[in-house]
Amino acid sequence: MAISSTTADGSLRKFNRASVELLSSMRFAIALLTIISIASVIGTVIKQGEPYNNYVNQFGPLWAEIFNGLSLFAVYTAWWFLLILAFLVVAVSGVSNAVNILDGFNGLAGGTVVVILAILSVMAHQVQDSELFILSVLLAGAVFGFMLLNYPFGKIFMGDAGAYFVGFLVAWIAVLLTVRHDTISPWAALLVCAYPVTEVLYSMVRRMWRGQQAGLPDSEHLHSLIKKRLVRRYFSFLPAWAKNAMVAPSIWLYSVCAGLLAQHFASNPALLACLYVGFVLVYRDWE
């Protein structure tokens, strides 16, 4: 019994390790994008939603049956197409929405984005991807120019349009960096964006756990807790703008640590996954 239990535990660990490696591998990311691309081409070439007899006449009974089983005659509503698309959309829109959430404290959104882009530009330079390197540097420079008026006095903010646009670009730079270079694990991109991604996901889970709508605003984000528990307690004598500005540097430090680790261990998916879990636990400890 003991030997059989040990063998089963060993097999389970091997299966879990293999699953993590698959989900974090470059092959998996490329496969998803390839499937979406091929499906889109098929959906363009083959007329969608036609009567089944039309397809039988066009392809013959055998191929019509095979294509129908793969949902190629209604590819844009097939469950597998929607699942893959949802995965990719969540990965990109999550970062976009996260930047918008951060745009409440002076320098928080802008500084975090500059840190993320700086790390991504270094990673792009290491793999000699001049296009993504230049794009990252240019976007970081643009956001830094915005920071000159946003921090520390908060004269302007990104607003919804600016935050969503910048977040969208950051997300796609991170995605393209992992898709174009098999030496950079998708876990590295996730760890670089650890704070904004965790902020969105954890906030949604927290609200749903309490029976609230996932999209409702609250004051329990990490940056809000830092202001309530640290800044207000120890720096209550400062003017309002200074207390607001003191929140961002701690988040910048959090993002720098996550980004440097992601950059250093970019090709080690198992370690990167463990590091991301560690950063999530650090976030959770503040709740």
Image: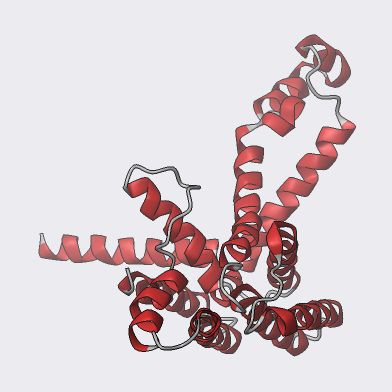
Q: Position of residue 245 (x, y in %)?
A: 55, 82
Q: Would you say 62 lies left or right of 212 here? A: right
Q: Residue furthest left?
A: 1
Q: Position of residue 133 (x, y in %)?
A: 80, 82
- Please name whichever residue, 56 or 271, is drawn nearer the observer in this view of the structure: 271
* Quadrant in the rendering for residue 167: bottom right
* Quadrant in the rendering for residue 111: bottom right
Tell me if residue 171 comes above or below residue 36 in the rendering.
below
Residue at x-position 64% and y-position 67%:
26
- Please name whichever residue, 95 or 109, is drawn nearer the observer in this view of the structure: 109
Residue at x-position 40% and y-position 88%:
235
* Quadrant in the rendering for residue 197: bottom right
- Check the picture and name the quadrant holding the C terminus: bottom left
- Please name whichever residue, 85 or 37, is drawn nearer the observer in this view of the structure: 85
Q: How many marks?
A: 0
Q: Position of residue 38 (x, y in %)?
A: 79, 45
Tell me if residue 24 comes above or below residue 31 in the rendering.
below
Q: Would you say 47 lies left or right of 158 here? A: right
Residue at x-position 40% and y-position 77%:
226
- Please name whichever residue, 250 or 126, is drawn nearer the observer in this view of the structure: 250
Q: Position of residue 43 (x, y in %)?
A: 81, 34
- Check the picture and name the quadrant holding the N terminus: bottom left
Q: How is the image coloured?
A: secondary structure
